[in-house]
Amino acid sequence: MNIHVATGIGTGPTKMAAFDAALNHAGVANFNLLRLSSVIPPKSKLIIHSNGPIPSIDGNWGDRLYVVMAEMRVDTPNVEAWAGIGWVQDKKTGRGLFVEHEGNSEATVRHDIEQSLAALMATRNVDFGPIRMKVVGRTCTHHPVCALAVAVYKAESWKVK
């Protein structure tokens, strides 16, 4: 399974519009998002997108899209919105874990990701190796903003087979 990790930033006249703009920036705006817990299945390959949207998702308008997602919306001037996804993954098996965090500073989000992943590995008594993460943020100036980090598992049609 390929899992795509991307970020998005959005601005709009409302927090919802800013969220939609961030979804669009990440390339996932036209799907119905279904949030997953944070387990990476065996044999998974993570594809990290550094800038811009995920180029193409195998799915159609309105399909279900399975994601792990962090999103922070703010509408107060001079307040920051930060979102991040962190992960650990065993190089041999592909198994791993995601965590998602939001906050008002990059440092807080990075710290929370590190602490959470360390705790999740300790709970499971596993060491999946180094912690990696993708974190994004923006400061609200005049209009609401949204920071988004998303890991996309797959799209699925609503058609019953």
Image (tube, grey):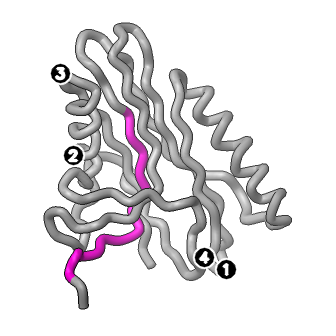
Q: State how far apart marks 3 and 1 are (Cα).
A: 47 Å
Disc ID at residue 92: 1
Highlighted range, magenta:
147-159
Return the residue at label 3: 13
The residue sitting at 73% across, 42% down in the picture is 115
- As helix, strand or loop, the secondary structure at mark 1 comes to loop
* Mark 4 neighbour class, 10 Å CA radius: few under 14, some 14 to 19, many 20 or more: some
Residue 154: x and y in percent read: 35, 71
Identity of the amino acid at label 1?
A: Lys
Query: Residue lying furthest front in this view?
Result: 160
In this image, 80 relative to 96: left or right? left
Disc ID at residue 24: 2
**4 or 3: mark nearer the eye:** 3
Disc ID at residue 12: none
Q: State how far apart marks 4 and 3 are (Cα).
A: 41 Å
- Specify which label sits upstream in the sequence, 3 or 1: 3
Q: Is residue 149 magenta?
A: yes
- As helix, strand or loop, the secondary structure at mark 4 comes to loop
In this image, 114 relative to 69: left or right? right
Residue 78: x and y in percent read: 39, 8
